[in-house]
Image (cartoon, helix red, strand yellow):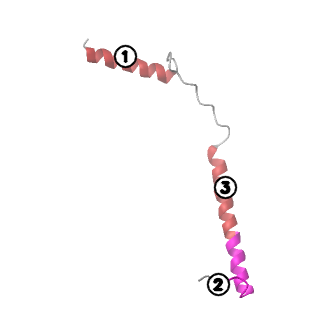
Amino acid sequence: MTATDESERRLAEALQARATGAGGRGRTRAASRVRGRAGTSTGTALLLALLGGAALGTVLALVSLLAPGVLPPLG
């Protein structure tokens, strides 16, 4: 074996050991698992923001139609 083959073999062994969690020193802790689905809270927040914006827009549109002059002019 040449020096290049030996270094490639050692690198492959090190990567395999690290992937299986059998690495010696320098091992990091496994990340803790997140409970539940991560996309749930983000999707819910976006949906609530959309519904809130639609409700606010509807209220402003009704106020401007039913009570002209109540809202200040834009510009």
Q: Position of residue 58 (x, y in %)?
A: 69, 75
Upstream in sequence: badge 2 or badge 3:
3
Which residue occupies the extreme top position in the image?
1
Give me the C-alpha separation between circle 2 and circle 3. Answer: 31 Å
Q: Element at badge 3?
A: helix
Question: Label 2, label 1: how many angstroms apart (C-alpha)?
Answer: 74 Å
Query: Crowding near pointer 2: few (<14 within 10 Å), some, many (20+)?
Result: few
Label located before the other in sequence (2 or 1): 1
Quadrant hosting residue 55: bottom right
Q: Which residue is mark 3?
A: 45
User: Which span is picked out in magenta?
Assistant: 55-73
What amino acid type is highlighted by mark number 3? Ala
Q: Which residue is mark 2?
A: 73
Does residue 67 appear to the left or right of 43 in the view shown? right
The residue lying toward the viewer, choosing from 28 and 36, is 28
Residue for point 68% across, 83% down: 72
Q: Nearer the viewer, mark 2 or mark 1?
A: 2
Label the magenta part by its dominant secondary structure.
Answer: helix
Picture coordinates of residue 15, whole percent (x, y): 43, 22
Residue in view at x 63 percent, y 31 percent: 32
Q: Position of residue 44 (x, y in %)?
A: 67, 54
- Label 2 sits on a secondary structure element that is loop
* Picture coordinates of residue 24, whole percent (x, y): 50, 15
Residue 10 badge: 1
Q: For residue 7, which quarter of the picture? A: top left
- Vertical relation: 23 (above or below) 67: above
For badge 2, the amino acid type reads Pro
